[in-house]
Amino acid sequence: MERLRQRADFLAVANGARAGTAAFVVQCRRRDDDGPIRFGFTVTKKNGTATERNRIRRRLRELVRRLPAVSLQQHSDYVLIGRPAALTSDFADMFGELRQALHRLDPPRRKAVRGN
């Protein structure tokens, strides 16, 4: 998985779907190209000192690293926005919340209509 680094990419994802948890917010945007899945991470200054923000960012990166690629939409960009609760939350709980948030962002699959 690749990282988002350009501000324009972050702004584009901000207009997409979002799902919030206690420790972070997940934003998702499907792209029209055939590129890989990309992730970006944001932690604002209101979340604490630089040390705390870096710890939040490292925890979010590790969550994404442990995700199976099957649970992600192909050709999509994701941004995780850290919240202060990400410092103290149990890692296993955060992982479960991330999986649930990604499931909520997944578009509903339509059932095939069988002909008579």
Image: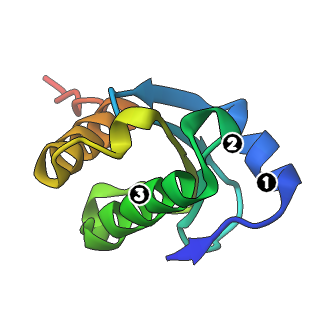
Q: Which residue is mark 1?
A: 9
Q: Is residue 77 left or right of residue 106?
A: right
Residue 97 at what x, y percent from top left? 23, 38
* Up-down relation of residue 20 to residue 83 (above or below): above
Q: Identify residue type, mark 1.
A: Asp
Which mark is on residue 13?
2
Query: Image quadrant of residue 56?
Result: bottom left
* Up-down relation of residue 26 to residue 40 (above or below): above
- Give the residue at x 14% y 43%: 93
Q: Which residue is mark 3?
A: 60
Residue 114 at what x, y percent from top left? 16, 30
Residue 95 at what x, y percent from top left? 21, 51
The answer to which of 54 and 112 lies nearer the viewer is 54
Q: Is residue 91 left or right of residue 11?
A: left
Q: Say whether residue 107 is visible.
A: no
Q: Nearer the viewer, mark 2 or mark 3?
A: 3
* Up-down relation of residue 71 to residue 15 (above or below): below
Q: Are marks 2 and 1 in contact (CB under 8 Å)?
A: yes
The answer to which of 23 and 37 lies nearer the viewer is 23
Q: Identify residue type, mark 2.
A: Val
Q: Earlier in the sequence, mark 2 or mark 3?
A: 2
Structural crowding at the residue carrying mark 1, measured as other residues with C-alpha within 10 Å and reported as few (<14), some (14–19) or many (≥20): some
